[in-house]
Image (cartoon, coloured by chain):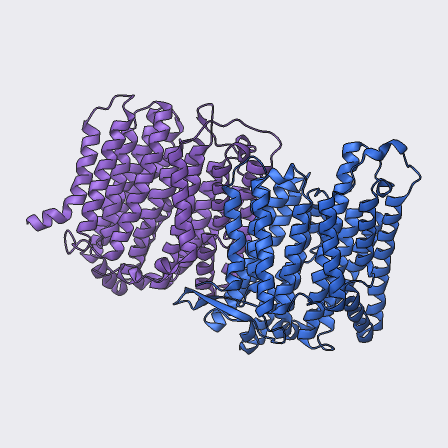
Amino acid sequence: MFNLPTLLILLPLLGCLFVMFSRRDADNAYHISLLTIGSGLALILRLFMQLDVTEKKLQFVHNFEWLQNANIIFSFGVDTFSLLLLMGIYLSLLTALIGLSPQAREHKSLLAWNMYFLADITGFLFANDMFSFYVFFAAILLPLFMLIGQFGGLKKKMSLYLFFIFNFAGILVLLCALVLVYKYYHGNIMLQEIALMNMPPVVASVVWGGVCLSFLARIPIWPFHYWISTVIANIKNPLVYVIVTLIPLTGLYGFMRFWHFTIAESIRPYIDIIIVCCLITMIFIVLIGIAHKEFLYKLFSYITFYYLLFLLAEILLSSIFQADSLQMNIAYTIFTFLPVTSTLIVLDLRMERECEDKKCDYRGILAYMPKRAKLFVFFVLIALGLPVSAMFWNNFIIVSALFKFSFNIGICVMFALSLITVAMLYELYVMRDLKKHIENNDDIQDISNIHLAYFVTIIGILFLSFFNPLWFKF
Amino acid sequence: MLEQFLYILPLLILLGGVFALTVKKFEANATPQCFKLSRLILIISLVLSIIFYNRPMVANLSLANYSTLLFICWLFTSALVILHLAQKWFNTMQQSGASFCRPLVMAVLSGCLLIISKNLFLTTIALILLIFANMQILWQSHENKHSHWLKGTPLKLSLFFGLLIIIIMGKLYYTCGTTDYNVLQIALAQNQHLLVFAAVCCLLLAFVFLLAAAPLHYWLLEIATKASLPVLIYFMLVPTTLSLIGLTRLNMMMLLPLSNSLQIFYVGIGIMSIFVGAISACSSSNIRQILICSIIYNMGVIFFILQHFSLLNVQTAIVYWFICWLAYVGIGTSLFCFKSKGEYLFAVEQFANAAYQKPYATLMVTLFLFSLLGVPPLSGSLGLFVVLNELAGHNHFYSIVYILSMLIIMSYAYLSFIQKLYFANSRNNFDRSGMDLHILLFFVAVIMVLITIEPRYLMEYPWIAEIFHG
């Protein structure tokens, strides 16, 4: 009845139910979450073993007839691109779970909504038709709203409303586009059939412009940047922070899935505007990152910069690369980018918590934690381009291709990249600064051995990806 | 003769029930007895309706088919749910529920007549009965000294529209010489006199009043401000559903020749209701008002759909309302879970951080509210999709934009309530709520999940084709 991709969608839902009905005491819900993510990773590896990575079409396709008369069929399938992204998401959520404080592990609603989010995003990545694409794209909003509202530490309720309304509006725009597609196609449409659709040019512009707009609403590009920066500023929970940083990925993924088929042709007159918005946002977000004192905000700038870079690459480099090879390039980068950023989030939030508990200064904090310091420095350097992971190669290819496409755009990107590199390196310097070193602060806890082992494993995974991004496929 | 008597038996039992509830004197603290009796009457009547579902009581006046059975089941389910919830309220308040049960059974009787009717005379009787039941329920609140306001707008309007319906029926009978829908349809096609058209519009206005669509929505807003919880839930679920069924039948069986002329009427009502519903909801600080505004908004959407007199549109409208109705049942039941110091809560402020003490009820109410917003994968998204699809099919793109823009505004009202439930700074203490409410909520949630997973039973079963045929 179920094939592996469907099972991967259902597994977190099952985990969500178990978490909801688990006992309140102890860490039952937490252990169920860990088990679910672990089983999910095992299933992903199993899928990779069976997957033909040279095949461009979606594989393991499973259709579920929803409405016969209306011709709506939910269709799911996987390819290397979606599976790599999912694996990256699983790794980053696992990292965030491990980084949860003992108090946070007892919040059943946090863990349940996390499981629900995972099910939705899996369905979104595996969607093979426009209807399921819409359903899972929109379904992500509910867990996001609840997680941010409950654990986001928002001081102004208006920020939460704005977050919801921005995203809700994006969803409704996508719904309108879907309804129009339905009208002209007389039924649900598979992604690979989109290019074959025959629509009047004006309608096509409206439909694909709407689709493009709804995806852009999830990426913090001007003028949609406001909600995410206000939301992310107060989050102190690693799991919620990681989930929020995954929101732009949903927009980017949607954009990349649709771009080749139709969007590029239908909204050609507006492409320059998107590129300009993208570059301006990129530079401004990096400058804001520099101005902020917190490392987490700098990290947010860094993450946003990369999402915008991928978006720019998708828009500009489709003519240089083949669509699939560009997608794979980006997927390899994101696969390493997600665990790296989530590790940094977890490590930094843990340090902030230590500082608050021990009432010590954040400046020079790394000096008291030798093991954590080494890990932290190493991960920051990986993020900035140390040649030990797949990120190095693929970023190199993307940036050089951007230079090849347009020297001016390449300069802008390099400028922003240099700024964010300087900002993060400076922060590293601040965290290791011994000017305010106090001898009696030795009771600050360093990283536990279990966590150390986990992060070393992550480093191992990243290191192997340097030689072969798909090293785990035997 | 005996056969006819058997077919009419469900209605006679309801009538007898009304009589029994009127005659029998219930003591003030004997709440369970009248509720038991009412429940018994409803269940017997429902069973008999199911047994004789395809037997019309009088062939010239009524329909009896699979669709009438479905609607009757829908009506009885509403009534039984309301009875169960009302019993809790009357128990808590230590009041006799007889004055509530009697009009409720009467409303069910009127609903049965409305559902099976294919004659304007029968429809008129049903509507008068429904209005009378509504008035009695309002009056019951008055007797309980909950409100002197009930002497005001709602009762006066009810009386006015009751009289108006009788006059219109008389006028149409005088003009066309019959009250049979099919014959009236032919007569209306041949005689499109201005006075007849005005009479039809007045008849529709009576339905607009019962559906609480703008501009005749004030009475329900007024009830929302002051009435008790059972009264509110009754008005949310029963008169609206019955009037919608009656209106769709009227449209398809009688008003078809006037469809082009009436389109602007429906669109106008739709535009006003959506606007009033969305804007009023945002300015409400009371969950009852928010819910009523939500109903007004949804009625506007339904009027947008009903502007085209086709089977598909009727199906869309009914499916959409059924999904909303389910959400309202869920929210209404959830509201019974939120009680503090013996008082049922209404002001949004009072629900501060309810999630800590009532996680289950809070989660459910949140899901039902998100369902009303049409957020996938909740069942409301199916309703929203079929509505937009239907409008797009008729090229009403501006209507789609309007409905969705107002939905975004509407979302603010729901969010403010959800925000209070989960993320408020203050905290209220809540009383324990019964397991029965949780079970009811669970059932509603299961039905919604089933609709989401397998909507074909709702969307593709051929019940729609039977709505207008004997």
Q: Position of residue A121 (x, y in %)?
A: 58, 57
The one nearer the camera, B151 or B30, is B30
Residue occupying image coordinates x 55% and y 33%: B356
Residue occupying image coordinates x 41% and y 41%: B441
Inspect this view and state whether residue A445 appears: yes
Does B124 sit left or right of A259 as displayed?
left
Does A437 sit left or right of B448 as displayed?
right
Q: Residue furthest left?
A: B1
Residue B190 in which image quadrant? bottom left
Does A226 sit left or right of B186 as displayed?
right
The one nearer the camera, B30 or B348, is B30
Inspect this view and state whether residue B151 appears: no
Residue B21 in which image quadrant? top left
Q: Position of residue B184 (x, y in %)?
A: 23, 59
Residue B59 vs A77, above or below: the answer is above
Q: Position of residue B16 (x, y in %)?
A: 17, 36
Does A261 sit left or right of B41 as displayed?
right
Chain letter corresponding to the colour blue: A
Image colour assigned to chain B: purple
Q: Position of residue A208 (x, y in %)?
A: 60, 69
Residue occupying image coordinates x 18% and y 33%: B19
The one nearer the camera, A445 or B410, is A445
Residue A110 vs A258, above or below: the answer is above
Say how many tags the image has.
0
Residue B248 in which image quadrant? bottom left
Residue A435 vs B457, above or below: the answer is above
Considering the image in quadrants, where does the C terminus of chain B appear?
bottom left
